[in-house]
Amino acid sequence: KPADIECRIVVLGSGPGGYTAAFRAADLGLDTVLVERYSALGGVCLNVGCIPSKALLHAANIIDEAHHAGEDLGIEFGKPKITLDKLRSYKEKVVGKLTGGLAAMGKQREVRVVQGTGTFVSPNELEIVGADGKTQLLRFEQCIIAAGSQAVKLPNFPWDDKRVMDSTDALDLADVPKKLLVVGGGIIGLEMATVYGALGSQVTVVEFMDQLMPGADKDLVKPLADRLKKQGIEVHLKTKAAGVKADKAGITVSFEAAAEGEKPALESGTYDRVLVAVGRSPNGKKIGAEQAGVTVSDRGFIPVDRQMRTNQPHIFAIGDIVGNPMLAHKATHEGKLAAEVAAGEKKEWVARVIPSVAYTNPEIAWVGVTETEAKAKGLKVGVAKFPWAASGRAIGIGRTEGFTKLIFDEETHRVIGGAIVGVHAGDLLAEIGLAIEMGAEAEDIGRTIHAHPTLSESVGMSAEIYDGTITDLY
Ligand code: FAD
């Protein structure tokens, strides 16, 4: 059968992994097609993930700052009056600017964008069904699968009821519910709890594990948990949502303790809306991978080697669909690598660390080895912690609850991990990631002159604490 479209390389999915791969492939001179089922490029991250959530968190932070100004600085702004339509259109404008920018960048590079849902029909062919039902056959020499992931929908929730939301629905900001239940105290759940809490919802968070944000060290989570409590956000750990009933009064959820036989801290509650944020599952089983002979794991991940190749050497896979951590910056790096390898460059994955950031208030950010991990693996490490209560800048902005922690290899004094909790922690983390990649020792970091008074000084101070050379605080 003759193909409707032929190309050297096709990228399936236009999220951060996919558009990066397509742009890089085109820059390297490959005739490139990018297939995306939605009209806007950018995938989850730009349309219903990283970007809109951060636009809304910006609003939440302004409300919080205004509160702080009234309470501590003697500058009263009064109770915020929220015009939801305007806030929503701000978020949409932010998203539009970025997705529009991508379309322009694709055009400039002569990447052919095909809108439709792609399914493999052979190792070198995709069938693409457009929104109008029209089918096109695309034949490729090489392919990069970047089809991403989607929110896990717990089966016992009535998903046809609009009051039950996943993260995409929550970002739609249909209203500010009086009472909101967030099921899942991970990054996404807590970011949305922060937004809705600031906008005025009475928020309850339930988490199955014994700490919020499992994956981060426990000490990092404490300043956030304390602040959530102060803001009136109720948190119940070791608790799982069991039964769900929807009626006119709301969504009534009953809870069970995570450990069998124990009583839950909260038995049940009725909410105006419920956000289920219990993780994301890869789309590996939804693209006809078997027709291309591409191996997919039981959970829907596509295994790849250090060059992002699947078991089929001409087919690569990148981003959420290849595994954790499901983060945009991991996807973009993998996308670039896959395109370069596809173009014949001899490269492989060499990144030592992938940073994680929760854009909550305060932010929590970590990179490399965590203290928990070091203990579990029996690594010989030294840990240095600089409390922000000793930072002139943190005191000045009234945010002393934070701290900066560095983890060093005891033998080499090289930094192998680091974490920050506090405002702007995500931005501050970059220095630690670079230090790890460059193999920096405590002395390198401590002797680097950091500007005063900045929160970034706390990284240098932590290194000095480890080296025993710290002279002054503030
Ligand atoms: P995706 O972004 O999932 O894109 C996949 C694309 O493929 C989609 O556009 C989809 O429509 C398309 N597609 C799928 N199947 C087909 C098909 N058969 N045919 C055609 N097209 C198809 N990460 C961060 O690093 N920082 C953050 O702050 C952050 N915040 C987040 C907040 C939320 C609420 C959510 C949900 C996620 C967040 N993430 C964040 C995670 C981040 O969005 C993902 O890691 C990232 O989008 C993964 O990129 P990807 O390229 O693998 O795939």
Image (tube, helix red, strand yellow):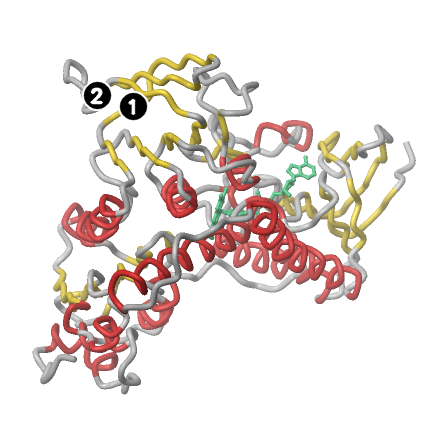
Does residue 417 appear in this view? no
Residue 408: name its quadrant: bottom left
* Rendered residue at 77%/37% (across/down): 116
* Rendered residue at 37%/55% (across/down): 357
* Left or right, 315 with reference to 220: right
Q: Are marks 2 and 1 in contact (CB under 8 Å)?
A: yes
Write down the residue under mark 2: 257
* Rendered residue at 56%/59% (across/down): 337
Q: Position of residue 211 (x, y in %)?
A: 22, 39
* Left or right, 415 with reference to 114: left
- In this view, the residue in front, 157 or 326, is 157
As shown in the figure, which amino acid type bears the numbered disc 1? Lys
The quadrant where ligand 1 appears is top right
* Left or right, 452 with reference to 90: left
Circle number at residue 240: 1
- In this view, the residue in front, 356 or 211, is 211
Q: Is residue 280 above or below residue 250?
A: below
Q: Position of residue 419 (x, y in %)?
A: 26, 60
Residue 371: name its quadrant: bottom left
